[in-house]
Amino acid sequence: MALIVQKFGGTSVGSVERIRHVAQWALDCQAKGDQIVLVVSAMSGETNRLVELATQINPIPYSREYDLLIASGEQIAVGLVTLAINTEAAKRGLIKPGESRARGLLGHQIGILTDQIYSKARIQEIDTTLLRKEISRQVIPVIAGFQGVDSENNITTLGRGGSDTSAVAIAAALKADDCEIYTDVDGVYTTDPRLCKEARKISKISYEEMMELASLGAKVLQIRSVELAAKYRLPLHVRSSFDPVEGTRVVSQEDLGGAMEQVVVAGVAADASQVKFTLQNISEGPGVAAKLFGSLSRAAIVVDVIVQDIPSHGVLTVSFTVGKTDALKASQVLDEIKRTSFPAMKIVEERDLAKVSIVGVGMQHHPGVASKMFSLLAEAGIDIKLITTSEIKVSCLIAESQMKSAVQCLHQGFELHRL
C-alpha cells in the first residue's frame, strides 16, 4: 500500500465535468489499495479574476486582505471536489447515506503554518495529526493548495503556482511514497510546445535542471516545490489529468544514471515577463549594492539578472531585472532609495523584454556551450542585452518580440528535437 499525494491544477478542476473526473480518478486509485491525499488549485481563471478585481482597487494590493481574497478560489474548488467524491462514492455503494469518503480541508484546518510575507509566504511547518487520522479511516483528505496561516492566524498565500508547493510540502510532511502533479500537459518538455512544435517530452529530469527551468519561465512546476522535493528526496511525477500516460519523473542526478553525461542541454526556457532597471550615476562607495538590493529584498521583490559596471569617475551603473508583477513595487522602492540615499541617481526602466535560457547538468562537463548559444543567437540576428550563468544554465535577456525565434533556433541548434 502506497501513500500518494495528488495535486490537481486549475484546468484539471476547471469545470463540473473535470471535477467529476478527478473524483472518479481518486476513488479508482484508492480502490487499487493506495492511500490518497488530494491537493487542489482554484478553478482555471478564478485566481486571475480575483487578482484583477483587487488591482482595480489598488495597483499594488499585496496585503492581509489581498491574501484573504485570492485564497477563496481554492475553498470553492475544495468544496466541489469533496462533494463530487462523496457523490460518486455513494453511487458506487462505498458509503451509506450520511457517511463521507472525502473531507475538504483548508490550510488553517490542517495547520499549514507560514511566515507573514503576504502573497509570497513560505511554509514553516505542517501539523499532520488530522491528516493521518483521516487517512487511517480510509477518508480522502481534499486540501486547499496555495494557502496557509501565519502565527497570528491570518490567511496567507504562497505565490502563483503555490499549490505545487503545498502538495510537495504535505507529501514531505507525511513521508509519502510519491507526489503526482496533474496538469494540462503530459509532462515536462524540452521547451514550450506553443513556441516550438518540435518540443519533446522528457521522461526523466534532475531536480537541479527542473529548478532552473522553473525559475527561468517553465510554467509546469513552481520552483519552490522542486526545491522542497530535492531537499527531502521526494519523487515527483508530472502527469496529465486528461490522458493517463506516463509523464515526467523529477529525480536526483544519481537516478538519471548515464543519461546525464549524454545530454548536454536538457531544455530551453523562455520568460516574457521581464522588466529591466538601470540605475545610473550612483556615487561609488562600500555598501551600495547592499543598500540597493537589501531594500528590494525587504519588499519581497525577487531580483534576477544583476550586472554592475566598472566604476568610472566615482560613479557606477547597476542593471537588474524583475518580473512584471514586481515592477511597480520595485519602481516605488527605487524612488524612495533615490530620495533618501542617492539623489543624483537616474532610474531607467525598460519593458518588452524576455529571458531565454538553456539548462542541462551535462553543461558542467562540456566546454563551449555558452559560446555556441551566443553564436546561434547572433546567426538568428538576436541582440543580447544581459547575460547570466550558473554551472547548469546560461540565460540571455533579449527583446520580447524575438523570444519565439530565439527558442526555436536554440532548440534546433542543440538538437533537442532528437531527444
Image (cartoon, rainbow, N blue to C red):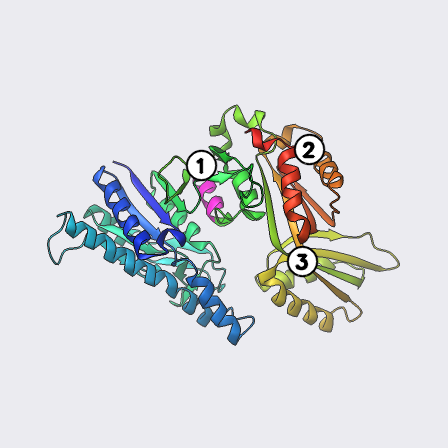
**SS class of the residue under badge 1?**
strand
Q: Secondary structure at mark 2?
A: helix
- The x and y percentages for residue 248 are 44, 36
Q: Residues within 10 Å of mark 2 (few under 14, many from 20)?
A: some
Query: What residue is drawn where x is 30% and y is 49%?
Result: 22
CA gap between label 1 and label 3 equals 32 Å
Taking depth in this image into account, of 56 and 167 the one nearest to the observer is 56
Residue sticking out furthest to the front: 197
Gap between marks 3 and 2 measured at Cα: 27 Å
Q: Work out whether 88 lies above or below 30.
A: below
* Mark 2 or mark 1, earlier in chain: 1
> Mark 3 or mark 1, which is nearer the start of the sequence?
1
- Residue hosting label 1: 248
Which residue type does callout 1 highlight? Answer: Thr
Position of the N terminus, as image quadrant, is: top left
Q: Which residues are magenta?
A: 225-234
Q: Is residue 286 visible?
A: yes
Q: Which residue is mark 3?
A: 352
User: Please, is residue 86 above or below residue 150 in the view?
Assistant: above
Direction from residue 86 to residue 344 in the image, left or right: right
Q: Which mark is residue 261?
A: none
Q: Which residue is mark 2?
A: 369
